[in-house]
Amino acid sequence: MVKVGEDVHLSCQLMQTKDVLQITWQKDLPEGKKNIATYSEHFGQTVNDGFQGKLEFIDAGLENCSIVIRKVMEQDEGCYLCLFNTFPDGSLTGRTCLHLYELHEPILQIRESNSSEETVVSCSATGRPAPTVTLNVPQQDLYFSNSSTVSVTNTNATVTVTTTAVLSGFHGNDTQVGCAARLLSVPEIQVFKMIPAVNQSSDDDHTLIRTRIPAVVIVCVAVVITVIIFLLNHKHKNRCSKPLNSQEMEQTRQSTPEE
């Protein structure tokens, strides 16, 4: 088991005394076995095309041979073989398989519930293969309920697992909640967050705000209506005070009866 992006060392040791001519490293691919590196006393160390810069010898010998694969990625996963080519017995083969894992730090989120004695806690962790996500709380008088877990497979073959639960049993004290992400035999990753104590004055402030909101809305509406009435009156006054043109004056003169 190797974490994505780390280096991996592969070692092969011959436990019998044999006349070894060459050691060959191979990778087992779906289309067949492919030689990736060889070592012999005559030709020395050879890394084949496609693996140069990726693979290096760290201990080269005819009875003990080790290589390192740098910054392993998904395409490096699979089984590797080392062949001790002996005379006259032929090849003696050892085999090891490389499995990659990926585990990122969990993301712990806390949001308020409709009840002052409950809080919704959610934790997400991304890994490959799918990690196990667990919520925990040290206080004995607190408990999780209505727990649910959702898994989503990402385009890079990782899986994001999200566990959500309702934390109940608050008594107005600071509360620490934690989340642990586990993956096979890999050491778990934990994160913690603190839920602050419920402040009564805060509740009173919220109540006061809810009480004042309707009054503020009424005042705002009244101001808007007053402004609209003022603008309409001002517009009407300007229209009435507008001077008459010559045609309007002539029409007014004709409509006025002579004495």
Image: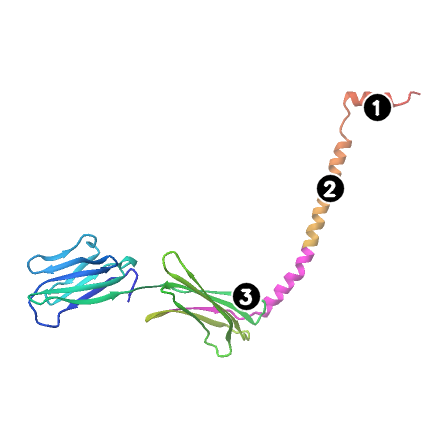
Residue 236 placed where, x, y %?
Answer: 76, 35
Closer to us: mark 1 or mark 3? 3
**In what element is the residue under mark 2?**
helix
Q: In the shown orientation, is residue 163 left or right of residue 63?
A: right
Figure label count = 3
Q: In the shown orientation, is residue 90 left or right of residue 30?
A: left
Q: Which mark is residue 20?
A: none
Vertical placement of residue 254 versus 131, above or below: above
Q: Distance between the Cα atoms at labels 1 and 2?
A: 30 Å
Q: Distance between the Cα atoms at labels 2 and 3?
A: 46 Å
N-terminal-most mark, 1 or 2: 2
Judging depth in this view, the residue of 213 and 57 nearest the camera is: 57
Determine which residue is flagged by label 3. 112
> Residue at (86%, 20%) from the top-left corner?
254
Q: Which residues are magenta?
A: 189-216
Q: In the shown orientation, is residue 104 left or right of residue 199?
A: left
N-terminal-most mark, 2 or 3: 3
Residue 214 located within the stretch drawn in magenta: yes
Q: Distance between the Cα atoms at labels 1 and 3?
A: 74 Å
Closer to us: mark 2 or mark 3? 3
Closer to us: mark 1 or mark 2? 1
Residue 90 placed where, x, y %?
Answer: 10, 65
Judging depth in this view, the residue of 202 and 144 nearest the camera is: 144
Determine which residue is flagged by label 1. 252
State the quadrant of the N terminus.
Answer: bottom left
**In what element is the residue under mark 1?**
helix
Query: For residue 161, which quarter of the picture?
Result: bottom left
Determine which residue is flagged by label 2. 230
Amino acid marked by disc 3: Glu
